[in-house]
Image: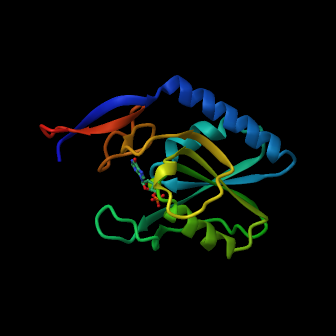
Amino acid sequence: MMTRMGPVLVASEDIQAKVRELGELITEDYRGEKVLLVGILRGAVVFLSDLMRHLELPCEIDFMEVSSYGTGTQSSGVVRILKDLQEDITGRHVLIVEDIIDTGLTLSYLRRTLLQRKPATLEICALLSKPSRRRVELEVKYLGFEVPDEFVIGYGIDYAGAYRNLPDIRALRSEDAHA
Ligand code: IMP
Ligand code: MG
């Protein structure tokens, strides 16, 4: 499929303002503690790198890469860990940092997996969510924006590896005649 950038859904200035706000909230909530940010590769790297600069807390970062088993675009809810954490999270305050939540299956699985390692706390911070697509209940403590059921790109989020470097979040459009 030939694709192109569609309209801006969340402009760069609005993303930056929201990331600052989330950083302030997290700073309040974790005051006096040290937090381990767990970025989900690869989409969350842009968000994580901006977010951490708004945390006035001792903080460390680590990363996981996962891929969901499934046929085509249909997510099965079974997640394969491609890259695991390097840190032992037992007894630590862990904050998962994700780019976008769609069905919720990936984070739901990840949350269960990480809880088995007995962190002191485990919360989720996601920049975007598509609530109309949710298939499992998932508590997201820190959320940036809700977006409609459209395929989005930019600010770390890709289509087939491309568009991660866009400063705004946009919809993806296909070049098909009837698109
Ligand atoms: P979930 O398990 O269905 O919640 O899928 C979450 C993952 O699907 C995210 O981490 C993204 O990698 C990917 N994803 C979901 N929606 C989009 C989108 O609109 N654009 C790009 N990637 C997406
Ligand atoms: Mg992802």
Q: Position of residue 80 (x, y in %)?
A: 45, 72
Which residue is pictured at 58% across the width and 44% down the height? 48
Looking at the image, which residue sits at the far right?
32
Number of numbered discs overlaid on the protein picture: 0
Which residue is pictured at 61% across the width and 60% down the height? 138
Which residue is pictured at 45% across the width and 49% down the height? 43
Q: Position of residue 44 (x, y in %)?
A: 51, 48
Q: Tell me, yes or no, if residue 12 can be seen here.
A: yes
Name the residue nearer the viewer: 118 or 56.
Answer: 118
Q: Going by the image, does 76 lie left or right of 162?
A: right
Looking at the image, which residue sits at the far top?
13
State which quarter of the image contains the C terminus: top left
Q: Position of residue 162 (x, y in %)?
A: 31, 43
Name the residue nearer the viewer: 81 or 126.
Answer: 126
Which residue is pictured at 47% across the width and 26% down the height? 11
Q: Going by the image, does 89 lie left or right of 157?
A: right
Looking at the image, which residue sits at the far bottom?
116
Q: Tell me, yes or no, if residue 167 can be seen here.
A: no
- Quadrant of residue 52 in the image? top right
Q: Is residue 96 above or below residue 14?
A: below
Q: Position of residue 63 (x, y in %)?
A: 55, 58
Name the residue nearer the viewer: 77 or 45.
Answer: 77
